[in-house]
Structures are given as structure tokens and as C-alpha cells.
Image (cartoon, rainbow, N blue to C red):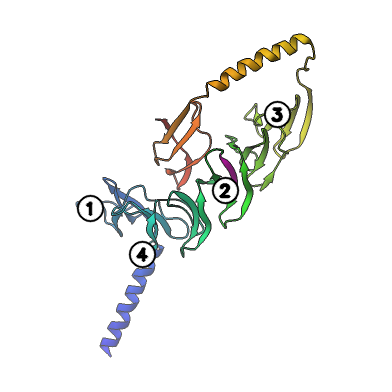
């Protein structure tokens, strides 16, 4: 009888320990690019950190998310996978890269291409994208996707694999300020024209008709955008309501204008003969690289390695190579 009681107590104790391990808050800790996970806020002993999960991972590995999973990079093969708070492998470390995770969905890279998988290893988005990056607000989290290099084509996809905006836009530019309702806005370009897309709104707020990206002239909320189309100037509200401001500079039909246009065309042709130089930028925090024309830093993009406070990410910190 005593043996049975001991067995029951031992089993209950093991179960309790297992539950506590899974439920407790863990944080990444280590040195020399070898990291494991310890109880959050715990102090290191004389021999170093008291690891709950051994330091078998690089320090580029991620913190645990709200589902109790962490995207990790193995020290042994430098490949990425997913573990739970018991240190058990949920997804084998066999991917070239692993970045954003949302509700058990992981953005991963394999054989040079990006895709989306779940914690059972099921492919939600095929590994055929040249770039996938999480874009988010407090309400919405989606993926900015890119296919091809010449030309590059962009669009938006949600974490279930549903295409929100077809991968057919030539350019995506993030408006560097949240609007009144907390949403984020993007200028998307197609066939030489721009339109405004709202992340929380889940739709285009304007037509694709403006000659250049919509821009705001004041940081005061609500934001007011300005744009031109075929010489006409407009003021556009955060919700996409247009207000006509008037015509721009009139086009001259005189012979002198024709001559001037001819001269301008020659200058343009001359510029085409000397293409603008391309530069490569590298994020100093997560080592992600971007190549773009012109010396200005790439716009937008969130850095999963740049952690502040509760774990919210901020933008890449670029360095020109």
C-alpha cells in the first residue's frame, strides 16, 4: 500500500513539475552565440545561468510567443526550427531561416525560397517567395510578399495563406506613421500609378491613380495626405475621401515648349544611359540584407531581432555595405 502511495505521489509530482515548466515565463540567455532559456528574471549562479532549456541554440533564436513556442536556430547545424517550453522539438531544425510566428504559423526559408508552415509542419504557403516579412498593428498581422527580381512584384498575404492583395504591384512604400485608428498605410504602385492601402481596413482606400506616393505634410492627427493625378491636386483623408484642390501648372502647347520638351527628352535619354547605382544595406541586428537603387536606406520592414520592452519589434537598423 505504501509503495502504491509513493508511486501516486511521485507521478503527481512529475506531472506538476511538467505543467509548471510549460506554464512558466522563460527568457533567452547565454553568451558567445550559445543561448538557452532560463526562468524569466532569475539570477545566474557562480557557474552561469540556470538553464531550463540547455544552450543548444544560437543567440539569434527568438523568445517564446503567446502560444508557448519559440523559433530557434540550432548551434549544431545553424538551421532553424521550433521548440516548446519543455525544450521539445516541435518543428525540426531544417530550415535556412525562421522569422515571424503568429498563432502557431511560422515564416520559414528553405532551398532559397520563403514559405509559411504550421506547427505540424504543414505547408500553408508554398516555398516560392523571394521575400516574406511580417507587417502588423495591434489588431492585424499580415505578410508582405515578393516574387521575382526583375521585375520585383509585391502583395499582401495573411497568416492562413490567403492572398489579400495579389502579388502584382511594382512597389510598396510604408507610410512612416500610424494613423488615428492605429492602422498602418502603404503606397502601392502599379503601371506607374500609386494608391493607398490600409492594413487594419483590409482594403485600398483610394484608386491606383496618383502620379507619386501619397504623402502627409503634418504629423498632426488625423493625417491628411496630398497627391496629384494628371496635373490635378487632391487632399485625401485617412479614410480615402478626396477633396479637389485645383489644377496644377498648365501645360503649354507653344513651339518653345515643344523645343524644351525635345531638350528634356535628350537629357532623360542621357540619364537612362547612366543607370542609378544600386546599394546593399544590412540590418545590424538581424543581418537581413536589402538591395535598392539609390543611397537612401530601405523603407519599412520590421526587425524581429530588435526587441523592446514586452517583445514588440521595431524597424530594421540599416548599415550600407
Marker disc for residue 227: 3
Q: So how many labels did they put on this image?
A: 4
Indicate which disc, 3 or 2, sits on the residue closer to the N terminus.
Answer: 2
- Residue appearing at x 34%, y 77% in the figure: 12
Indicate which disc, 1 or 4, sits on the residue closer to the N terminus.
Answer: 1
Q: Classify 10 Å Cα crowding around label 2: few (below 14), some (14-19), many (20 and above).
A: few
Q: Are marks 3 and 2 in contact (CB under 8 Å)?
A: no
Q: Are marks 4 and 2 in contact (CB under 8 Å)?
A: no
Indicate which disc, 4 or 2, sits on the residue closer to the N terminus.
Answer: 4
Marker disc for residue 88: 4
Secondary structure category for the residue under label 4 = loop
- Residue 308 can be seen, yes or no: no
Q: Are marks 1 and 4 in contact (CB under 8 Å)?
A: no
Distance in Å between CA atoms under marks 1 and 2: 38 Å
Query: Which dot, 1 or 3, sits closer to the camera?
Result: 3
Give the main secondary structure, helix, strand or loop, of the magenta stretch: strand
Secondary structure category for the residue under label 1 = loop
Task: Find the magenta span and give its range.
Answer: 152-156
Query: Which dot, 3 or 2, sits closer to the camera?
Result: 3
- Which residue was labeled with disc 1? 45
Indicate which disc, 1 or 3, sits on the residue closer to the N terminus.
Answer: 1
- Residue appearing at x 63%, y 15% in the figure: 266
Marker disc for residue 138: 2
Indicate which disc, 1 or 2, sits on the residue closer to the N terminus.
Answer: 1
Distance in Å between CA atoms under marks 4 and 2: 30 Å
Query: Which dot, 1 or 4, sits closer to the camera?
Result: 4
Secondary structure category for the residue under label 2 = loop
State whether residue 180 is above or below residue 111: above
Indicate which disc, 4 or 3, sits on the residue closer to the N terminus.
Answer: 4
Amino acid at each position: 500500500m505504501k509503495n502504491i502511495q509513493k508511486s501516486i505521489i511521485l507521478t503527481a509530482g512529475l506531472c506538476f513539475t511538467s505543467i509548471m515548466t510549460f506554464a512558466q515565463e522563460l527568457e533567452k540567455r547565454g553568451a558567445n552565440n550559445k543561448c538557452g532559456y532560463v526562468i524569466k528574471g532569475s539570477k545566474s549562479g557562480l557557474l552561469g545561468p540556470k538553464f531550463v532549456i540547455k544552450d543548444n541554440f544560437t543567440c539569434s533564436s527568438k523568445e517564446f510567443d503567446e502560444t508557448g513556442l519559440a523559433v530557434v536556430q540550432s548551434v549544431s547545424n545553424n538551421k532553424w526550427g521550433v521548440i516548446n517550453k519543455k525544450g521539445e522539438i516541435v518543428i525540426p531544425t531544417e530550415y535556412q531561416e525562421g522569422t515571424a510566428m503568429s498563432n502557431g504559423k511560422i515564416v520559414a526559408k528553405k532551398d532559397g525560397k520563403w514559405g509559411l508552415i504550421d506547427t505540424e509542419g504543414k505547408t500553408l504557403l508554398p516555398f516560392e517567395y523571394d521575400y516574406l516579412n511580417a507587417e502588423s498593428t495591434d489588431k492585424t498581422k499580415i505578410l508582405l510578399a515578393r516574387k521575382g527580381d526583375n521585375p520585383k512584384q509585391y502583395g499582401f498575404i495573411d497568416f492562413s495563406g490567403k492572398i489579400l492583395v495579389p502579388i502584382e504591384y511594382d512597389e510598396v512604400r510604408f507610410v512612416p506613421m500610424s494613423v488615428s485608428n492605429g492602422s498602418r498605410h502603404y503606397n502601392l504602385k502599379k503601371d506607374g500609378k500609386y494608391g493607398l492601402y490600409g492594413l487594419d481596413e483590409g482594403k485600398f482606400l483610394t484608386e491606383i491613380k496618383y502620379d507619386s506616393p501619397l504623402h502627409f505634410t503634418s504629423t498632426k492627427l488625423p493625417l491628411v495626405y496630398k497627391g496629384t493625378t494628371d496635373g490635378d491636386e487632391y487632399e485625401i483623408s485617412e479614410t480615402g475621401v478626396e477633396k479637389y484642390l485645383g489644377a496644377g501648372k498648365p501645360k503649354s502647347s507653344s513651339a518653345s515648349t515643344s523645343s524644351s520638351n525635345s531638350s528634356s527628352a535628350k537629357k532623360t535619354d542621357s540619364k537612362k544611359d547612366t543607370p542609378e547605382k544600386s546599394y546593399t544595406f544590412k540590418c545590424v541586428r538581424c543581418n537581413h540584407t536589402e538591395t535598392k537603387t539609390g543611397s537612401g536606406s530601405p523603407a519599412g520592414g520590421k526587425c524581429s531581432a530588435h526587441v523592446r520592452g514586452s517583445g514588440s519589434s521595431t524597424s530594421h537598423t540599416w548599415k550600407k555595405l
